[in-house]
Image (cartoon, grey):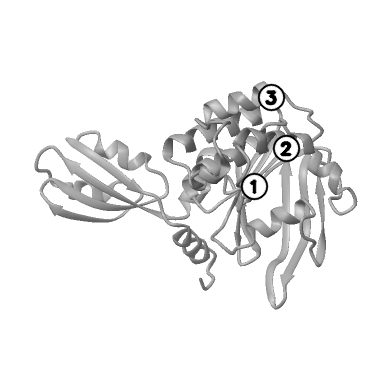
Amino acid sequence: MSDDLAIEIRGLEKAYGPVRALRGVDLEVHQGEVFGFLGPNGAGKTTTIRCMLDLIRPQAGSIRVLGLDPQAAPQAVRARVGYLPGELNLEPNLRVGATLRYLAALRGNRLDWGFVEQLASRLQLSLNAPVKNLSKGNKQKVGMIQALMARPDLLLLDEPTSGLDPLMQQEVYRLIEEAREGGATVFFSSHVISEVEVLASRVAIIRQGRIVETVAPRQLLSMTTRRVRLRFMEAVDAQVLAEAPGVTALTQEDATSATLQVEGGMDGLIKALAGLPVADLQTGHPSLEELFLAYYEEQGEAA
């Protein structure tokens, strides 16, 4: 394994009976990187993460996590990893603080409790709250705290913002970036393109147990067509925008509104809009399925 790799996976295969969850996954994640793992539900994201921690074992392939084989040294790997599972199970009869102290004890109490309190404050979570009374979003906050609290070398986060409102999502983004700045490597799964675009320096796209592509986030949107809705402060002839770079279709509903389709970047359209009285502009990110369809069309394959 290369010294600069935090995760190295080669030819990973895993089947659940007749269902082939992973079909030869290859991944490399560099130390200090925030790496996104993007795919629809059932694509193999969670299975890959569980194999990294030796929670399940693959039928074929090799894995190195922080230079270690998780099958040969599972405890050594887990001691250096903060893990947020996609389905977090907590003891309902404990309070949040007691839950986190119990999890800290499993790590040998080698952490700063003041940091735990700081995380809880930033995520607006009471350490005195009974777990059984927590909403899904607040349980997710407990999961984020326990993953971060030991300041691990590697964070494995399975859908980290699931159940959180937009303000808390932004706070989680900040915590992930601060962990990276502190030297941690972050590997997180998601099915939300915009989330990967915000956080990741690179992203692997997984579909039906295979890695489709590994790209920079900005390349994701260049594969697809965006929908842009415009509203003007006064009547205009929006047809002048049809010649703007990237615009492939334009529909003007009435004199003060129009809908466009734009391929690739938005720079050309923004410059073309400079001379028009724009009151409002809305863009729609492509869905994950649209991204895959665009990718396969680009590769000349059947979707």
Q: Which mark is residue 91?
A: 1
Q: Are marks 2 and 1 in contact (CB under 8 Å)?
A: yes
Secondary structure type for disc 2: helix
Answer with mark 2 or mark 3, whichever residue precedes in sequence: 2
Count of marks overlaid on the render: 3
User: Residue 268 at x, y = what percent?
Assistant: 34, 41
Front residue (pair 101, 122): 101
The residue closer to the viewer here, 228 or 186, is 186
> What separation in Å lies between label 1 and label 3 (alpha carbons)?
20 Å
**In-image side of 191 versus 285 (left or right):** right
> In the rendered image, which residue does mark 3 sit on?
113
Q: Residue at x 40, y 50 (%)?
A: 285
Marks 1 and 3: CB-CB under 8 Å?
Answer: no
Viewer-side label of 1, 3: 1
Instruction: Return the residue nearer the eye: 157 or 233.
Output: 157
Q: Residues within 10 Å of mark 1 (few under 14, many from 20)?
A: few
Side of 105 relative to 158 (left or right): right
Q: What residue sits 43% from the left and 34% below the top? A: 167
Badge nearest the viewer, 2 or 3: 2
Q: Residues within 10 Å of mark 3 (few under 14, many from 20)?
A: some
> Residue 158, position in %: x, y?
62, 49
Which residue is painted at 80% across and 54% down in the image? 54
Q: Amino acid at mark 3?
A: Trp
Q: Residue furthest right?
A: 72
Q: Residue furthest bottom?
A: 18
The answer to whether residue 146 shows anywhere in this view is yes
Dot 1 lies on which element?
loop
